[in-house]
Image (cartoon, rainbow, N blue to C red):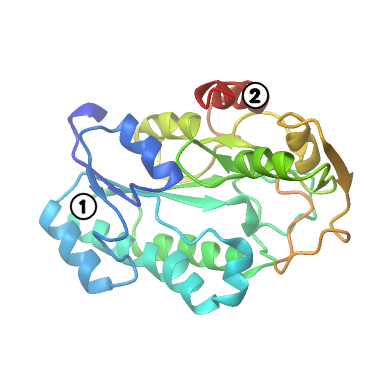
């Protein structure tokens, strides 16, 4: 099947990732949160039945990691039951589902995680996203769950923009140097989705190549940054020390430093 000929629905089209997915799939039907509340099973079933898409790409999520600790019910509804509603509707419509999960489903006790490793989330955000994965798998077989990490893109709040802002506002910026992962540019991720749609159903780890700490990432963005420990920089939600996703199923994407350079160029920085 030719990807360009299929009918695609993008849910969460106004978000950071969703905006870049819209560029890759310009002819897709696009839903923002105002168009579709994924926590309403009735509305999701009705919308997908009426559109009758071949592929549904779900980029809708509640991604405020610390906020999830305060709003647990919302986190489980949006990140857990919402994807389940979409999967049920896709199963009925005979549509493929592409859904985005997270590195935070792992506890950080290993240096890196393959797609087959057992999840063990240590915060509400991770647990809610893992619930979403399980709801999908319970409902259908024709899914592609893409686990992603440390996203940055031109259409939303992200670590790069936060560092640039803090660098202007403060003499020095402290960033943790004991949490490790893989920064990922939403443009590169969105482009890879076309390929994933045509691959076998299952779970995929898709990130830019290269591993770094948050401090190393920050050091590539701003000059006035100092390392600190997670204990020094207390957050409401516990973060995994290592959330490095090993991609064992597809060709690696470009290095995160190259992707960051492209992002900064896009932003005229």
Q: Judging from the image, what secondary structure is the residue with disc 1 in?
A: loop
Q: Is residue 227 left or right of residue 116?
A: right
Q: x and y percent of residue 173 in the render?
A: 80, 44
| Residue situated in front as seen by the camera: 23 or 189 | 23
- Left or right of residue 76: residue 229: right
Residue 178 to residue 1: above or below? below
The answer to whether the residue labelled 1 contacts the one labelled 2, judged by CB atoms less than 8 Å apart, is no
Q: Quadrant of the N terminus?
A: top left
Left or right: 115 with respect to 54?
A: right
Residue pointed to by mark 1: 94
Q: Quadrant of residue 46?
A: bottom left
Q: Residue at x 88, y 43 (%)?
A: 227
Quadrant assignment for the C terminus: top right
- Within 10 angstroms of label 1, few (less than 14), some, or many (20 or more) residues? some
Residue 38: x and y, percent?
A: 32, 65
Marked residue nearer the N-terminal end (1 or 2)? 1
């Amino acid at each position: 099947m030719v990807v360009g000929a299929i009918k695609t629905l993008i849910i969460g089209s106004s978000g950071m990732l969703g905006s870049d997915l819209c560029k890759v799939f310009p002819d897709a039907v696009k839903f923002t949160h105002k168009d579709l509340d994924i926590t309403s099973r009735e509305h999701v079933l009705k919308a997908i039945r009426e559109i009758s898409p071949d592929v549904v790409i779900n980029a809708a999520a509640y991604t405020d990691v610390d906020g999830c600790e305060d709003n647990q019910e919302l986190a489980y509804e949006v990140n857990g039951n919402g994807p389940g509603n979409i999967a049920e509707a896709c199963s009925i419509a005979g549509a493929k589902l592409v859904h985005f999960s997270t590195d935070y489903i792992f506890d950080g006790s290993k240096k890196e995680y393959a797609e087959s490793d057992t999840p063990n989330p240590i915060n509400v955000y991770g647990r809610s996203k893992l619930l979403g994965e399980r709801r999908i798998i319970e409902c259908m077989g024709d899914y592609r769950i893409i686990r992603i990490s440390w996203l940055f893109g031109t259409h939303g709040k992200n670590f790069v923009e936060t560092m640039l802002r803090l660098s202007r506002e403060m003499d020095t910026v402290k960033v943790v140097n004991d949490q490790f992962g893989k920064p990922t540019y939403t443009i590169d991720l969105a482009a890879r989705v076309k390929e994933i749609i045509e691959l076998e159903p299952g779970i995929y780890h898709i990130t830019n190549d290269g591993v770094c700490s948050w401090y190393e990432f920050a050091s590539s963005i701003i000059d006035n940054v100092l390392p600190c420990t997670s204990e020094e920089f207390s957050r409401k939600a516990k973060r995994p020390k290592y959330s490095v996703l090993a991609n064992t199923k597809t060709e690696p994407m470009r290095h995160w430093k190259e992707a960051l350079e492209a992002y900064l160029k896009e932003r005229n920085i």
